[in-house]
Image (spheres, rainbow, N blue to C red):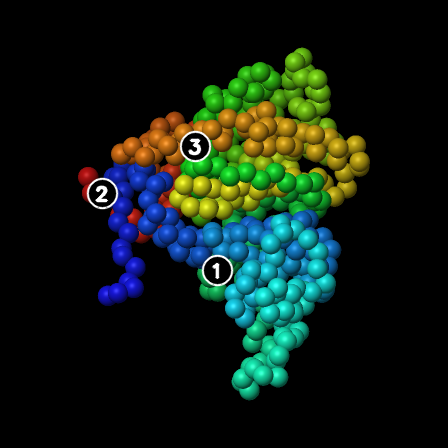
Amino acid sequence: MQGEVPEVVVRWPANFNEVPKEVFQREDVYRLELERIFYGPDWHPVAHTAELPEVGNYKSAQLGEMQLLVLRGDDGKVRVFHNACPHRGTRLATAGRGTVERVQCPYHRWLFNTRGELLGAPGQEEFPATFRREDYGLKEMRSAILHGLVFVTCAADGPDLETFIGEAATSIGNVLNKGKLKLLGYQKVSFASNWKEYSDNEGYHAPLLHRAFRLLKFQAGKGVQYATAYGHKFIDAQVQKNPPAEFLSDPSLVEFKDPDEPPRSAIIVLYPLTLMVKHLDVINVRFAFPLSQHETEVHYAYFARDNDDDEMVRHRIRQASNLLGPSGFISLEDGAVFNRLHEGSTTPGTVAFQKGFSGPLQGPCSTGQNDEAINLVRWERYRKTMGFDRVQS
């Protein structure tokens, strides 16, 4: 039938630890991902309340390819709307962040308050008699807040946020200081890779790829990787104190100064695409979204605790992007590898996860902190969500 979406067929390997390379390259797979994952029942972080602390503060965000507007209303509530006028679909906010008393569409000057309600429209006396202002407010999405992190979902009847996040909630609270944060700033980067290659990072590569771990003589303490039933993953490890790196003109870049907790490294990867890091004194949320099957954009947002003094804030600012930003000491090599993964996936066949793999995994479960097999929990959830059947062996 004309207009019918053709079936997307991917022959998934029978071996549990293998993933077909074609899912990183095919446009029809990417389009199905938008429908079933990004516009499906899952919850996606799009902002933190520390990014919009005052009435009228807004942030432009993105879910898949959908433009969103996160806005703190005059009642103090944070809401998430489609970033589009309900009249003719014109994009409203174009700046990354800002403050407004009202939201106005530039095309026909329809005016909305900060709760999304339509206040008026020029020429309304000539609209049809059936027109009602209450039917033309900004389209609000289903949203919820956890430790200050603002989540949205496209599904009206999917699982609630508490169910979706599950046991990852405690780790999120620990990384984000229970939501009591203040924004330091951003770095934004576009990687020439598929979103799944970006989010497939694991503990196996860290001491091998990143030269800074050797130069700085970083020694990892005891740690573990844990995956939930929904495919969220977190890594928690001790960080051992090391002698100052003599080649650094500012050794504070690798010093731990937070007086309220022991030095630890915590990384959370929420399914499908958001990453949070608390390493030394860096507090970082990476809001990511796909631009196509070949490109992924990531916004690195850096935070301080809301009760940090000026000296601690300055320290966090110096350490944040210099240590773990897209060109930071530790994470510099990631972008290049993401691109090389994507270039390599143009070849036929499969990729196979080996380190730590001894058989099929199902969340909740845990592995060693430098294993890669834990990612297979996420991959199995992806496969089932996409409806790809395994090849029978």
Disc 3 residue crowd, few under 14, some 14–19, many 20+, Cα 10 Å:
some
Looking at the image, residue 307 lies above or below residue 95: above
**Does residue 45 appear to the left or right of 74 in the view shown?**
left
Residue 61 visible here: yes
Could you tell me the amino acid type at mark 2?
Answer: Val
Could you tell me the amino acid type at mark 1?
Answer: Cys
Residue 154 image label: 1
Could you tell me the amino acid type at mark 3?
Answer: Asn
Which residue does the image show at 58% across and 16% down from the upper left?
215
Q: Is mark 3 on a helix, strand or loop?
A: helix
Mark earlier in primary sequence (2, 3): 3
Q: Quadrant of the N terminus?
A: bottom left
The residue carrying mark 3 is 339
Q: Quadrant of residue 181?
A: top right
Q: Is mark 1 on a helix, strand or loop?
A: loop
Label 1, label 3: how far apart the Cα atoms are: 30 Å
Q: Is mark 2 on a helix, strand or loop?
A: loop
Which residue does the image show at 70% across and 33% down from the upper left?
317
Q: In which quarter of the image is residue 244?
A: top right
Disc 2 versus disc 1: nearer the observer:
1
**Does residue 86 appear to the left or right of 320 in the view shown?**
left
Mark earlier in primary sequence (2, 1): 1
Q: Residue furthest left?
A: 393
Which residue does the image show at 32% across and 35% down from the upper left?
346
142 vs 364, nearest the viewer: 142
The residue carrying mark 2 is 391
Position of residue 41 measured from the top left corner of the image (x, y, whole percent): 45, 57
Disc 1 residue crowd, few under 14, some 14–19, many 20+, Cα 10 Å:
some
Position of residue 286 measured from the top left corner of the image (x, y, whole percent): 56, 41
